Structure formats: structure tokens, C-alpha cells
Image (spheres, coloured by chain):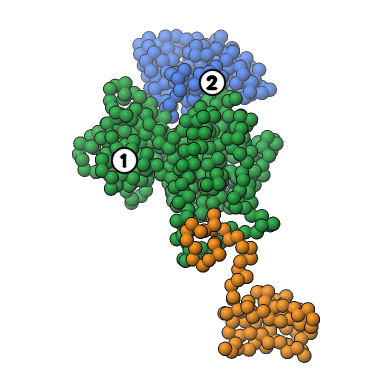
Chain colours: A blue, B orange, C green
Amino acid sequence: MIEIRFHGRGGQGAVTSAEMMALAAIAKGKYAQAMPAFGAERRGAPVLAFTRIDDEFIDVRQEILEPDVVAVLDPTLLAGIPVAAGLKPGGVIIINTHKNPSEIKKQLDLPTDARIAIVDATAIARETIGRPITNTTMLGALLKATGVMKPNDLVEPLKKRFGKIAPRNIDAMNRAYKETKITKGAS
Amino acid sequence: MAQSDKPRWQELEIGCIVTDPGSTRYYKTGDWASMVPVTDPERCARCGLCWVFCPDMARIRDQRTGAFDVNEFYCKGCGICARECPTNAITMQEVTD
Amino acid sequence: MTRRVGMEVSFALSEAVKNCNVDVISAYPITPQTHIVEELSQMVADGDLDAEFIMVESEHSAMAACCGASAAGARTFTSTASQGLQLMSEIVFIASNMRLPIVMAVANRSLSAPLSIWGDHSDVMANRDSGWIMFFVESGQSVHDHVYIAYRVAEDSRVLLPTMVNLDGFQLTHVIEPVELIEKADLGDFLPPYDPQIQLNPLKPVTMGPAGTPAMFTEAKKAQEVVTWNSRAIIDEVWEDFGKRFGRHYKAVETFHTDDAETIIVSMGGLSGTARAAVDKMRKEGKKVGLVRIRLFRPFPAEDLRRILSPAKVIAVCDRAISYGGPGGPLCSEIKSAFFGYSGAPYIANFIIGLAGRNVWVTDFEHIADRAQQLVLQEEPAPYEIIGLRE
């Protein structure tokens, strides 16, 4: 089972990212589960969303404490939220940021052998979609960093969800897939 | 409710429904009356206001004379008809045995 | 054929309601049920579901409208949660006493105060005595399936009782997971059209909901009790038929690794999956732990529970509600009652978990099993323990 935790701010579509991953996996015949950290949310407040993907039936219904993958949609979250909490050794953290990996390593308490994936998703989103909403862009980074699915697998769910604006979101995802840089976070 | 007064639980209808429509007509509410209205036929104008105002639909129209009789099975003796009669044809009198 | 779709559990429920071709829906929105009724209102507006959607100003009116509609012979649906269930509560009791086969999805959520929008079982437990048949489901699939099952059971002429499908708020309603949707065409004659045994009809007038005098009220309650207990046989029949047609076999009490279990965890509702994962893990570690998942709460499967739980040394009953000033968790007190007077009862430990949506981890269930094994050594009965309480 792969457990992914998304960190975002209300209104940035973190929950949508989680859903897109789950729906794509289910369409491929896998088992998947997506849910937000439940509750009333307001625009701008930090939010969490979770996705589990497995070849076996998924029994558990709880938030993800020890993710294999963490995706941080908003760089400003790094300062206040322990985004890397519980990240499994050897796990990967994907961050939308200008910073370089060594700066990230200094700022976050990463486990052994954690890998860091960096992408300037805000810039890509602004250029491709026209707004700094990074959820679909980050999907590309997520897929590059984890290899759990290919960008092509996300096309149908994205089309269904975004309709007319799907093409731009798909482009953003594909660009992030190309531009995401992954480094090993050697301890 | 089953028709008998004290049904066994097996005899109750589903959901205790009452299958006899308008079953309250069996209740002799006229037993409550301590006064009954008496109409002076000379003064009665056959206007029908006693029938209109009766809260219990206890007034019956005599088809032959046009006058409004009292159905003592239901009349509770409230006196509203006596109060409303425009010709003061109705007086309330005590029920005697 | 069935269609495997990733979808939010709330929508899997609305899909099933649509396929049941309900006649009347009357509901008022309340978190976390909102997606269910919003989706249904959209379906009606789009013409995908030919039903009357009665907008009402409160849950009390919703249930009243459902009673009226059902009394007139309509297949009726509503949904609510928490404060909404409490607001409609007086009519909830009336619906069952009037033998109206309404189906209601309750997105179980805690009762205020303090105000909580998160899931637990306190709302349904406060209405245990209402006389409704009560199912508890634990996955999107069982949610979808039990809408069909609920109507088939409720409308059976030998039953005619309103039925609740309980699904944990948020932990079920708002999760996206794969569901095998049953297509309307493939329901076949599993769910025949509603054929009312009693009905408001101007051509054949009856009075529904009359007054009940001291002289006959006791008999009326006895009649209701009898039909409630007798419904179990029909529920089993319907589950069997469902299993034959659709390949998913449901039972009042489901077991996992109970045959040689010394410790059995008893769970009900959406957290049962996490419990199952925990039992799986403990079994791999060689621990003799099992899980019982209660699917039917009313009528209460006392006999099944006695049979399945007796061989264990200790059972750990997990409640998602507390009955203040009472014997602890409602489910546990019912299980204890089920054993009273029977020899061979195991030690029964009670744990309160997941109040107002608090996460319950696999490790919590492992702790529960360990704690139960410690308690049984004491022999003395112990009061309930609240998992995760900060003291």
C-alpha cells in the first residue's frame, strides 16, 4: 500500500489532488481511498488530504500518520506545519518551492534516506493555467517522484473533473512531470 | 382498532389503523349535555343560522317543515344556537330524566 | 452487470436510491449528509429520477412529510444526522408505530453540545428505542447494497417497518473508494414495486395514527414488538437472496478469525475496517485475536452474539457513544444484557472510541486487545475505558 499525504491551504485543491490520484488508481483496477482531514474549512487555512493506493482491499479508515509520500502544495506551509512528520524512512517529500534541496534539508526534520522532489509549481501553474492553483501541477511532480502511475492515467479523471479547463491542467501536470527534480536526502 | 373494545394484540390492525371510516360518529356525545335547546316554532324563521353555528353538526333540517331539529345523540348543550338565533326562538332548558 | 467506479460513498448511496425508483424524497440538509440529498435533488432536477422532492424547513417536517407520503403508498426516502435526527425524533417513533416502510440513511454524527460535525454513534443510539430496523454498514459497497436491502426488507408485507441505514459521518460519507454499482436493470425483481398493505385512499377510507387508550396501548406495543422480532427471519432471507444474485453475502454478525480466538474485538460501523486490519496484524504476530462486526443492531442479534462470543476468554466491545450516568457504552450494555443469565459468558470489557470523529488507529485496536487481556486477569468487572483520553 502506498500512503500519500497532501498539505495545502483551503481553496488550493489539495482534496482534489487526493481524489484525482484515487480515481485514476481505481480506474486502473486498483483499490484506492481518498479523503480530507474532515471538518469545516476556510480559504487559506492549512488543510490535509490523504490518498491510499493498494492492489489489495483497503480496510483502514484513519488519517495517514506515516506516509510514504508527502506533497506540499504551498511553500508557505513549510514554516509553520510539520509537513514531514511521520514520513517513512526512504519516503519522498514533494515540495512546491523555489528553495534548493539543501535548504529544505536544513528546514525540515527528514528521516533517513528520504528523497526530496522540488518543483516550482506556482510558476508552472501561473504560466499554464493562469492562476497560482497548484493542485494539478503537483500531480505531475507526485507521479514523477513516486512512479505509482503515469500522467496518462490521470487524463480521464482530470477531464471528468475539470471539463473545459482540463487541457490546461493536464499541460501543467505534464510540465511538472518533466521539470520536477528529485534528489536523495542523504542523512 | 379492531371493532371490539378490548382487542387481543393479535387482533389489532397493522399500525393500529381504524378501518371503519368516520368511526367517531358512534360516540354518544349527547350524554354530556346538561341543557338542551328548545325551539319555539312560532318564532323560528327557518333561517338556518342555528345549523350554521352548531359546532357539532347536531342540527337536522326537517325536510317537510323547513325547521331545524336537534339531534340529541350529539348535542352537548353548548347554547351557541340559542345565542345566535336572530329571532330568539331558542331557549336552553335543563335536561330532565 | 455491475460497474466498478471510484466515487464518494455519499454518491454510492444516492445512486442506489435512484435505482430504487423512490417516489418521494423529503429531506433537510445537515453535515455530513448533505452530499447524499444534494445529489438526489440534482438527479430529480435533471430528470434522472422521477420523484417528488419535497423541500422542507426542518428535519421534523421532513419526517412528517415522509410519513404522509408513505401512508399514501409512496416509496419514500430521507436522510439526516445528529441534531437533525433529534429534531425529527418524535416523528421517528411515530413512523415505526404506524408501520410505514420509510428508508432513512443516517450519517452518524455526534450530538451537541459542544457542537460537533464529526462522526460517532450518539445520534442513532439516542433513538435505539424508536422501533426502526437498524443496519450498520462499514464500506461504500455495503452502503450501496443496503439501500436495496433496506427497501426490500421494509416493504415486505410481513415486516412493514421503517429502516435505518447507518453510515459513519465523514469516515464513510466523504471518502472516495471503489464501489461496484448495481445497475437498475440488473436489480431485476430483487426489489419489486411497493405494494402497500395499508394505505390512505379516499375510495377506501381508513384512519391512520389514531389515539391509543390505556385499554389497548399495551396490546399495540406487543404487536409491534412481535413484528420487530419476526423481521429478523425476513432480513436473513433478503440477505441470502442478495448474496445469490450479487455475490456479496451479508450477515447480522460477521466474524473474522473468531474460531480459536481468546480475545474478540466487537465493532460496529465504519471503524470495523481498521479493527480488521489490526486483527490481521495481531494474527501475523501469533496473537489469538478475532473480530466480530455487528451489521444488524435492531432487532438485536443476541443469540448470534452469544453463540459466537461464548468460546472466547474476553471480548472487547468498542462503542462510539456513551450513555451518561449509565452502564457505559450502549452497545456493550446490550451485549452484557444478552449474556445475563446464561452460563459460559466471557469477560466483557468496554472501550469508548472515536467520539466526534477522533481518529482510531490500528495501534488503538492493538492496545484494546492487550488491555482486554489484562482486564480479564482481574476477573472483576471494570468500568469502560476511553481510548485516547488525555488525563
Q: Residues within 10 Å of mark 1 (few under 14, many from 20)?
A: many
Decide: is A75 above or below C372: above
Which residue is pictured at 45% across the width and 43% down the height?
Answer: C232
Please identify the quarter of the rendering in which residue C390 is found: top left
> Residue at left 41%, top 15%?
A91
Mark number displayed over residue C350: 1
Q: How many marks?
A: 2
Q: Is residue A174 above or below residue C187?
A: above
Task: Please identify the quadrant where the C terminus of chain C is shown.
Answer: top left
- Image point (49%, 38%), residue name: C237
Q: Quadrant of residue A86?
A: top left
Q: Residue furthest left?
A: C378
x, y percentage for residue C229?
Answer: 44, 47
Horizontal side of B2 relative to A92 (left or right) equals right
Amino acid at the residue labelled 2? Ile
- Dividing the picture into quarters, in which one does residue C374 lie? top left
Q: Does residue A140 show up?
A: yes
Could you say which disc has been placed on residue A29 in the image? none
Where disc 2 sits, the SS reads helix
Q: Judge whether C3 appears above or below C386 on screen.
A: above
C17 to the left or right of A80 = right
Look at label 1 and name its amino acid. Asn
Specify whether disc 2 shares its chain with disc 1: no
From the viewer's perspective, is C41 left or right of C291?
A: right
Identify residue for label 2.
A26
Q: Residues within 10 Å of mark 2 (few under 14, many from 20)?
A: many
Image coords of residue A136 (percent x, y): 57, 20
User: Percent position (x, y) of residue C162?
Assistant: 53, 47
SS type, badge 1: strand
User: Mark 1 belongs to which subunit?
Assistant: C
The chain letter for the residue carrying disc 2 is A
